Amino acid sequence: MARRAKRYVYYFGDGKADGTGKMKDLLGGKGAGLANMTSLKIPVPAGFTITTEACNTYFKNNKKYPAGMWDQVLANLKKVEKSMGAKLGDSREPLLLSVRSGSKFSMPGMMDTVLNLGLNDTTLKALINKTNNERFAYDTYRRLITMFASTVMGVDRQIFEGVLDKMKKKKGVQEDTELSADDLKDLVEKFKTIYKKETGKNFPRDPLQQLRLSINAVFDSWFGDRAETYRNLNDIPHDLGTACNVQAMVFGNMGEDSGTGVGFTRDPSTGQKKFFAEYLIDAQGEDVVAGIRTPLHINEMKRQQPAAYKELDRIYKKLEKHYKDMLDIEFTVQNGKLYMLQTRIGKRTAAASLKIAIQMVKEGLIDKNTAIMRIDPEQIETLLHPMIDTSTPVNVIAKGLPASPGAAVGKVVFSAEDAEKAASKGEKVILVRPETSPEDIGGMDAAQGILTARGGMTSHAAVVARGMGTPCVAGCTAVNIEEKKKSFWVGDTTIKGGDVITLNGSTGEVILGEVPLVQPNMTGDFNIIMKWADDIREIGIRANADTPADARMALKFGAEGIGLVRTEHMFFEADRVQAVREMILADDEAGRRRALKKILPMQRKDFIGIFKVMDGLPVTIRLLDPPLHEFLPKTNTELRELAREMGVSFKKLQARNQALHEFNPMLGHRGCRLAITYPEIYEMQVQAIMEAACQVTRKKIKAIPEIMIPLIADVNELTVLREMTIRIATEIEKKYKTKIPYDVGTMIEIARAALLAHEIAPQADFYSFGTNDLTQTLYGLSRDDAGRFLPYYVEQGIFEDDPFITIDQKGVGLMMKMAIDSSRKIKGKENMKMGICGEQVDPKSVEFCYEVGLTYVSGSPFRLPQARLSAAQATLRKKYPKRYPKESIA
C-alpha cells in the first residue's frame, strides 16, 4: 500500500481552526484566522495555507520543498480557481493571487508579502477586458512589478518609488490615484526596464513561476534581518517557521466604490470600547499598512459606502465575541462588496491592555484569570514611562496622530542605523522618518520616540511602537523631511540632525527643545489589575531599596518588604565617604574604630528612615560588600587632591591605594572576608541597625531587620560572623530594654556555598540568592566585561538569554535548586525563608523562582508591577497547565 504524503497544505475552512493551539502552530496566526473566518461563514476570498512545518522542512532540505508540497499547492490552487470562477494565467478569466507570510506570533510587517501575482502582458489584457477599467489594470500591474522586484528579487523599492514620484511631479499631482491610465501604462514599461536592469532578467511571464518564487521569498523572509531582530526583541523562538497564505486577490483599487482598510475592534491605544479603523478609497492594503498614503477615518467609509460599512460593523462584533479578545482586522471592498482578509489578536498599549481586560471581565466574555494571562508583564513597565509636565510652557511646532502614548525627549536622527549607533553610545534619540518600514526595526527599538510624516494610526510605525511601548507621533504632514540634508522643516522652523525635540505620543504634539517629564500616577485600571494579580500569586514580592525615598517608591508599587538594602551605597555619600577613607588609612584597629564611630550615627539615621517607611515589613540589610579600594580615587591627580583635603602625605595615600589594589576584586578581599579581617566594620553596622530598630520601636514603629552577611563560601565564616552579630544585637537589646524580631542570614552567591548549603543552613535564618555573582562564578564571566560579547552569543543562539538578565535555569538554576532542596531537608529548616535579590524579575525568572519554592523575589521598585503580574501568571500556569500552557508567557 502506497504511503500517503504528509499534509503540508490546508484549504481555508479545512478542519477546525480556532486561532489557538496546534492549528495556530501549524497554520500561523493569519492562516488560522482565515480558516476560522471561513468556518464562521464570513466572506473571505478563497485560498489555502502552506504550513509552518513545510517552511521548517524547506530550510532543513537546503531550501527545497518537502516531498509532495508543490503537488498539494497545485491541487489546492485548482480548488481556489473553481471557487472564484477564474484561472491563474487564463487569457479570459485570469485569477490573481496574494502570497503572505503568517507565523504563530504576530510579527507585523517583519516578513514578506506579494500582491497581484499572476499578471503578465496576456492576463493584463484579459483583466482590462473583464473589468473595462484600464487604469485599474495598469495600477495593479505596476504594483506587482514593484513588490515582486523588491520582495522576491531584492531590488531597492526606492528606485521604483523615485520614478513614481517623478511622474507625479511631472503631472503636477500629489496622489497616485490622480495619475491616468496612460501615466500608469508608461510606469509599467519603465518598471519593466528597471527590473531587467537590476536583475539581469525579464519580469517572469509564467504565473506558476511567480507563485513558486513568491512562496520561496515568504519562507526566506523568516530568517531575514528584520524578522530575526523582531524575534530577538520580543523573545519569539527562531524555530517556529512561518506559514504561507496563498489567496485569491480582491481589489480595493477598482475605483470610488472600492477601497481597503485596517481596524481594531477596540482602541489599541486607550482600550476604549469603540471601533478604531482607517480606510482608503481606491487603494490596496499596502497603502494603509506601509503608510504610503495617510488614510481616512472609518466614518468616511460609513458615509460613502454605507452597506459595506454595515456589514463590516456586524462582522467585527461577531469576531470579537467569538475570539473574546480585541482583534486586528484587514478588509477590502471591491465594487461595493466587503471581503475580510485577516483577523488576529490585536497589539495594544499597556494601558489599553489593562482596560480591555477589565472591560471584558465586566462584559462576561472572560474571567479574571484569563484577564491576567492576557497582559504582557514586560509591557506593564511602559505605564511607568514619564509624561509631559503640563505645568511647563511648550513650543508646539506640529501636531500629528497620537499613535503610541507616552513622552520622549531626544536628539533627532533620520535613519535606523544612526539611531542604533547613537543609542550604543548612551545617547537618547528621536527617530524621524517619512514612514517606517520593517527594515527600521533596530532603530525603532533604539529610539526613545518615533516621528513619521506619513501613515496613520494603523501604519507600521504605529503598530510596532505600541507593541514596544515607545511613544510615537505618526502622519505628521506638517513635517517636511529632507533625508539627504538630515533635517526637516515645519513652516519657518528647521530642525537638523542632533537638535533636541520632545514628542507627546498621547496628544500627537511635536515640541521644540527639551521639555521636563514627570512620572505618571498609577491609579484606576492599574490598581485593579494589580489587586487581581496579588490575589492570585503565591510568591512574595520585595524591593531593592537603599534609601527612605526608594522604600516609599517600593511601597507605591506593591512591595511586601525590602529584599536588599546595599549599605555601601550609604558609604559613598559625600558627607561620609571622608570618614570611610579615614578608616581605610588608619594604621591600626584603634584608628579604624575612631573613624567608624563617625560613621555610626549616619548609618543609624539611614536605617531609622527606612524602618519608619517599612513599618511592620521585613527589611533585608546586606552588610558591607565591596572591597575597600572602591572608596578611594583612581588617578594620581585625584589622590593628590584627597591627600590635601585629609592632611596626609600623597605618598602614604598612594602606597595605601596600591596595597589595596587587586587583580580581580570581584574574587578578592570583600564581603565577609573584610569582616573576618576587620570585624569592627560589621560590628559598627550591626550596632547601627539594632539601635535604629530599638529607637523606632519605642515610637510604636515595628522594625523587622534581616541582617545579611555576603559572600559566604564556608560555614565557618558564617558561624563566626553570626556569633558576632548576635552578641552585638543582644547588647543593644539589653541597653534599650527592647526585643527586636531580627534574623541573621546570608547570601548564596558563591558556587561553593550553593554546593554546601546543607552545611550552612543550620547557621542561617534565611538565604538570599545573589544571582549576579553566582552567575559570574559559575560561568567564569565578569559581568562588567561580558557585555562586549554576550549579545553576540544570544544573537547566534549559543545562549538562549543573557544570563545576567534572565536566570540560567540549566546551570545557575540547577545550583539554586540544589541549595534549596538540600537546605530544606535539614530538620527545622523545612520552611526556611529564601529569596532572590539579583534584579532578575523578568517573567521567566519569576516563574522559575516560584517553581523551585523561593519565598520571594526582589527587584528595583519600578520593576515590581511586572514581577507581581509575572508571579500571578506563573501561579495560574502551575494550577491550570492545560488551560494556560507555558508558551502563553507574553
Image: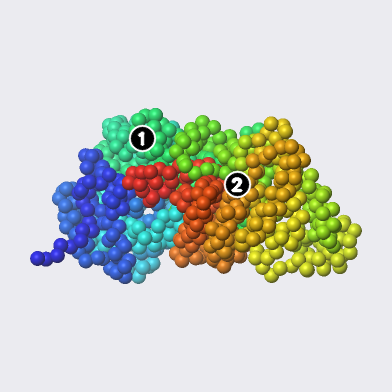
Does residue 321 appear to the left or right of 466 in the view shown? Answer: left
- Residue that badge 1 annotates: 366
The quarter holding residue 661 reads: bottom right
Closer to the chain start, of discs 2 and 1, is 1
Q: In front: 125, or 42?
A: 42
Mark 2 nearby-residue class (10 Å; few <14, some 14–19, many ≥20): many
User: Residue 258, relative to residue 51: is it above or below?
Assistant: above
At x 57% / y 55%, what residue is drawn? 761
The residue under the point 40% across, 35% down is: 368
Q: Which one is nearer the viewer's eye here, 16 or 368?
A: 368
Which-is-in-front pick, marks 2 and 1? Answer: 2
Taking 115 as reference, is 837 left or right? right
Q: Residue at x 36, y 44 (%)?
A: 880
In depth, the one of 828 and 282 nearer the eye is 828
Q: Which residue is mark 2?
A: 563
Q: Does any portion of residue 879 appear in the rendered image? A: yes
Residue 825 x/y as whole percent = 49, 54
- Graded by Cα atoms within 10 Å as few (under 14), some (14 to 19) or many (20 or more), the crowding at tag 1 reads some
Q: CA distance from mark 2 to mark 1?
A: 35 Å
| Kind of residue at badge 2 | Gly
| Element under disc 2 | strand
Q: Is residue 798 above or below residue 876?
A: below
Q: Would you say 120 lies left or right of 795 here?
A: left
In the rendered image, residue 5, in percent from the top left (x then y), is placed at: 18, 62
Label ID, residue 514: none
Residue 585 shown left or right of residue 827 in the figure = right
Mark 1 lies on a secondary structure that is loop
The residue under the point 53% across, 49% down is: 828
Where residue 28 appears, as percent x and y from the top left, is 31, 52
Q: How many marks?
A: 2
Instruction: Identify which residue, 179 or 677, lies in the foreground.
Output: 677
Residue 525 visible at all: no
